[in-house]
Amino acid sequence: MKIPGGGASSYPPYIHDWKTSAMASWICSLTLLPVVVWSTVLYGRAAAQVWAVALASSIVSEAIASGLSRRWTLGDGSAVLTGLLVATAMPPGVPLYVPAISAAFAVLIVKAAFGGLGANWMNPALAGVAFAYANWPAAMREYVLPRAVSGVDGVSAATPMAFAKGLASIDQGRVMDALRGASYPLSSMDSSVTGLLNDSIFSKLGARLPDGYVDLAIGFKPGTLGESALLAVLAGSIVLVCLRLIKPLIPAAMLVVFAILARAFGTGLPGEVFFGGDVLFALSSGSVMLTAFYMAADPVSSPVGRLPSLVYGAAIGALCFAFRRWGSFSEGVAYAVLVMNVIAPFMERTVAGLGARGRTREP
Amino acid sequence: MMRARGFKRGGVPVNQRVPFQTGPIENAFLPMNAVVLLKDTFTAVEPFPVVHVGQEVREGQLLAKSAGRGSSNVHSPIPGIVRRIDSVKTPGGFDSKAVLVSLEGSFSVLGKRPERYLWKSLNKADISHIVQEKGIVCVSNGEPLFEMIADRSSKPGFVMVISALETDPYRRTEEELLALRPEDVIDGCAIAARMALPARILLAVDEHIDATTVDRLRDIIVSSELDVSIQAFKRRFPQEMPRQIADALDIDDAGSLFVLEPSTLIALHEAVVANKPHIEQYVYIGGGSIKRPAILKARIGAPIGDLIEECGGFSGTPDTIVIGGPFRGRSAADLDASVTRTTRAVLALTAEETRSAPERPCVRCGDCVEICPEGLDPYSMLKLLRVGRNEEAGAIGLDRCTSCGVCAYACRSRIPLVRYFDDARRNEVRR
């Protein structure tokens, strides 16, 4: 009597966890959906076009790579995720060839040319972003205000970070108050929500939330597509951590180290004092959060093991701080991760090697 | 209730068990043809057949005689005629001689009411002789029970663990036997203790065991005058493996544990008090493709297809038929595979249960490292094996891998890690 089904796997175990690498990519992509929606609400067609072009470019590139290697890999979801992540780093209204070429570079050169998913030694999306910054520096720094703040489309403005760096002095590290003093635009949404929070929660704790942070969180400021939806990014990150799709130690170590350093040495803004840095401002501007959870914690390009993960995350946090503090570009965080991507295999050998030797001593 | 213990790291928590209708365990129908494998496991030594083709055999008559250490007597599970003696490929992947007996004639041993011998008047040597004679093997590892006990009794100071732990989502034979036949299990335990002389005895039970069963066991233990303590364990795979039991008990050396299951003790008990050879086996038949999952008391040599049919057959199409547990069992090539003394479960799993997917490249997620109950680094082990650095792989943990299957269970890329590990070690042995 033959078995009707035939028996797919021939070696134990015969049951498996629900997670597959393909499903992880698809869920990751799904968690970015709120970011897509929110940025489109904020910037309208300018944002939607960037998302669509990056996505289309990465899918076509993956199809080409599949054709060349005769291995159909679009189903693993990694191309779609890469396309979406490339788009998160783009400012709305960027010329559409920028996301198109960057996404193609990410998928074709950084991923496929090195052997496809699992073999890429750099995070493809970040490499694509770095590629864009290197080739079109001006276009990548051309930011606009969302409609909700300016009332019209396409009013260009500096990001809060760039603006603050240009100020003459910031009193006692109060970045937000300084921004207001220099008449940086503030939305009415911010004033009302901040007022509500101050009245209901912070007044009871004897604290006050300055105006402006709510704008940073909900994206009522000029910035990239990913930056504009901080709350959506955080929600997605919680899903990723709860489902254990990423290595949570990496973003944890990275953010802790980054926050401590930002507190101690400031964010490179004028007039900062020692241990007077604005941590909230540092964490919510630039794409620190998105990079921490979606790129630094990308399993393929990060080391395996708890100790290497901790060291890796901490090093990214420190580099990210250094690049932003003393470098002038907001993409410092992307370069921090890329540098560590390159070092990750070496780190895994040395740090993990130490860990393994430590374990063998046990009975 | 008592605090449940668990091993320290990794493992797969069994949050949901497949529902099971508990009730008295039924005897499976006698098979028309029993294919009796003479070798239960890869490591067992094949016994010599003592019957010839065409010979008429009684139920329980000796078919093959032990060939020395690692080998056990094999008896005919049914009365009938020996039709063939041939070498067959077992589901475990090794070759074994098998004796085919066709049912004919009448029952003797099991049709009668069992006589009950008072074993307490027997001495250690007498009991050991019976256990050897009746071909009793340890159900979990297939080793001859009298050898295991003799080895133990020569090195005193060990803990005898009666393990009713079943930490996969399916099988619960040991749990049921403990609840349905506690007197026989404890009596079997007393027999084993008389022979092996353990320092103490521990009854390992599931953390969710019901209180009435525990009370009943306590009463029986008191009247048996054995020194048995009951300990609950968390329901997390692979808690039932000796290393993980030792880890949960904070015992460094798993070798100081002597683990026996209720089903082995019942076989032992029946051999000693009822003179019954090891020709029956409690088999859990389950999995998503089985209509009515049940525990059957089956004759060895019975084809698994018959047992599945007795459970109402398949509902839907099974993806894989597994003999043994879902983590460590072996897939059956067809439904003619026969029950042996180590067949504890037959699972017909649906595609939703197996969740198999094509193997993809490693994405370095590190889940295997997190989940390994031995605290090993399967990721690095595989990486080293793939570049041929087998010795280094052995040094960082391959030598301590127990093939529990948890890493491959968790692998997102569905890499059959355990297969690579087992293959590497098998080649090492050959060299």
Image (tube, coloured by chain):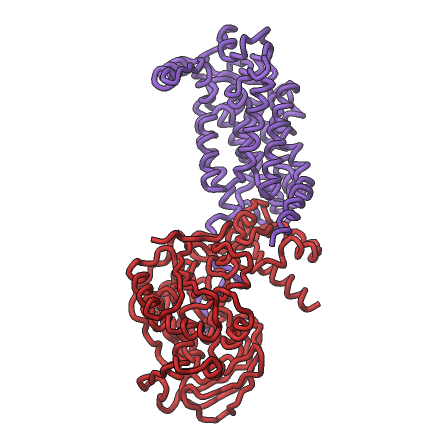
Quadrant location, the C terminus of chain A = bottom right
Q: Residue furthest bottom?
A: B55
Can you give x and y, in whole percent of width and height, for residue A147 in the image?
A: 45, 17
Q: Is residue A54 visible?
A: no
Q: Which image quarter is the N terminus of chain A in?
A: bottom left
Q: Above or below — where is B251 with respect to A33? A: below
* Colour chain A is painted in: purple
Left or right: residue A228 versus residue B205 is: right
As rendered, which of B136 and B231 lies closer to the eye? B231
Relative to B245, say whether A269 is above or below.
Answer: above
Q: Position of residue B396 (x, y in %)?
A: 65, 53
Residue A179 in the image: x percent, y percent? 51, 10
- Residue A145 appears at what percent x and percent y? 50, 16
Q: Which chain is red?
A: B
Q: Nearer the viewer, residue B13 or B255?
A: B255
Q: Nearer the viewer, residue A44 or B15?
A: B15
Q: Which residue occupies 56% across, 57% down?
A: B416
**Residue located 57% across and 37% down the image:** A58
Is residue A187 visible to us here? Answer: yes
